Image (tube, rainbow, N blue to C red):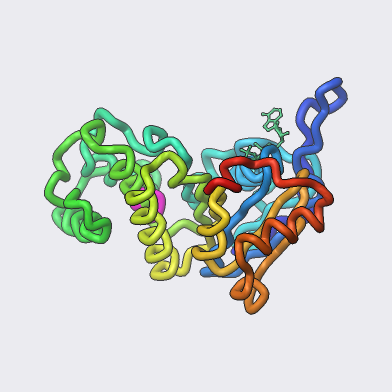
Amino acid sequence: MLRVESLSKIFGKGSINEKLALNNISLSLQEGEFVTIIGGNGAGKSTLMNCISGVYGIDEGRVLLDSADVTFEPEYKRSRYIGRVFQDPLRGTAHDMTIEENLAIAFAKGKPAGLQPGVTKKDLAQFKERLKLLDLGLENRIKQKVGLLSGGQRQALTLLMATIIKPKLLLLDEHTAALDPTIARKVLSLTRKIVAEEKLCTLMITHNMKASLEYGTRTIMMHEGKIMMDLQGEERKEMTVDRLIEQFEKRSGAELDNDRMLLG
Ligand SMILES: Nc1ncnc2c1ncn2[C@@H]1O[C@H](COP(=O)(O)OP(=O)(O)OP(=O)(O)O)[C@@H](O)[C@H]1O
């Protein structure tokens, strides 16, 4: 469970370029809640993820995970229980290592510190089982180097790696934006499946408004560092992309400036 309380983040404090990127954000997610995040350029979506995962320190507020205050915990410690997948498929895997070695590293996160990531027969069987879920035939290529995989295959593998040990929170930062539409849909349905099966608390940034309503259980729209719409339940079920744009423009008094969102 995630709780963000009155979070503010200022870049370049005191300088001519001072920017209030997050303005008093509060947000709570229950176990299994899958929240999609949309918003115009510079709305603060990635900054929110960076503050939650500890990449940036924050200026005000608190971040709690499973009731523990992690506000001042460094990123490397939070990464043990926060899974993250970025837009760039090259970022989450080591290209010169095999699929098995990559999975072993991710799997070792769940083992006591000091233990080497040795792969037992049982681990290997589990890796193959998980890879089968992807339906990309990777279970038969487990000894191959990741550098040989396509972007979509790598991103699907990164998703597996981020969730092979159940994270307390899964952060997906436009993780399908760089993939071609067919594989993007595949990775999105896989995301939905893993999140539901593992009851993962998940935040997913997307520029695709349709996907923001189609995937997940709740949709948040950000604008100028604030949450300006939080759609759940019936209200979300009845929402369409056209009405979402209309609501955005009405509530923010601005036109949506994110071309990718409008074209997506
Ligand atoms: N490291 C940084 N230093 C200075 N300013 C930053 C930094 N990171 C983000 N910002 C600024 O903070 C604001 C929010 O940026 P952020 O990247 O979170 O937006 P976003 O909603 O993810 O946008 P996009 O959809 O364009 O990626 C923007 O004005 C951005 O220029």
Q: Relative to the observer, which residue lies in front, 27 or 259?
A: 259
Q: Position of residue 205 (x, y in %)?
A: 56, 50
Look at 68% across and 44% down and name the residue there: 40
17 left or right of 96 in image: right
Look at 69% across and 38% down and name the residue there: 42
Q: Is residue 95 visible?
A: yes
Ligand 1's quadrant is top right
Number of marks present in the image shown? 0
Look at 77% across and 44% down and name the residue there: 224
Q: Relative to the observer, which residue lies in front, 131 or 208?
A: 208
Q: Is residue 115 visible?
A: no
Q: Please, which residue is most extreme toward the bottom here?
A: 234
Q: Please, which residue is most extreme toward the top here?
A: 16
Q: Position of residue 34 (x, y in %)?
A: 54, 64
Look at 27% across and 56% down and name the residue there: 134
Q: Relative to the observer, which residue lies in front, 90 or 61?
A: 90
The range drawn in magenta is 160-164
Question: Quick check: 176 above or below 244?
Answer: above
Q: Position of residue 29 (x, y in %)?
A: 63, 65
Q: Main secondary structure of the magenta part?
A: helix
Question: Quick check: 22 above or below 241?
Answer: above
Which of the 4 image quarters holds residue 259? Answer: top right
261 left or right of 107 in image: right
Q: Position of residue 149 (x, y in %)?
A: 24, 37
**Quarter of the image where the N terminus is located:** bottom right
Which of the 4 image quarters holds residue 104? Answer: top left
Q: Relative to the observer, which residue lies in front, 8 or 168?
A: 8
Q: Is residue 99 magenta?
A: no
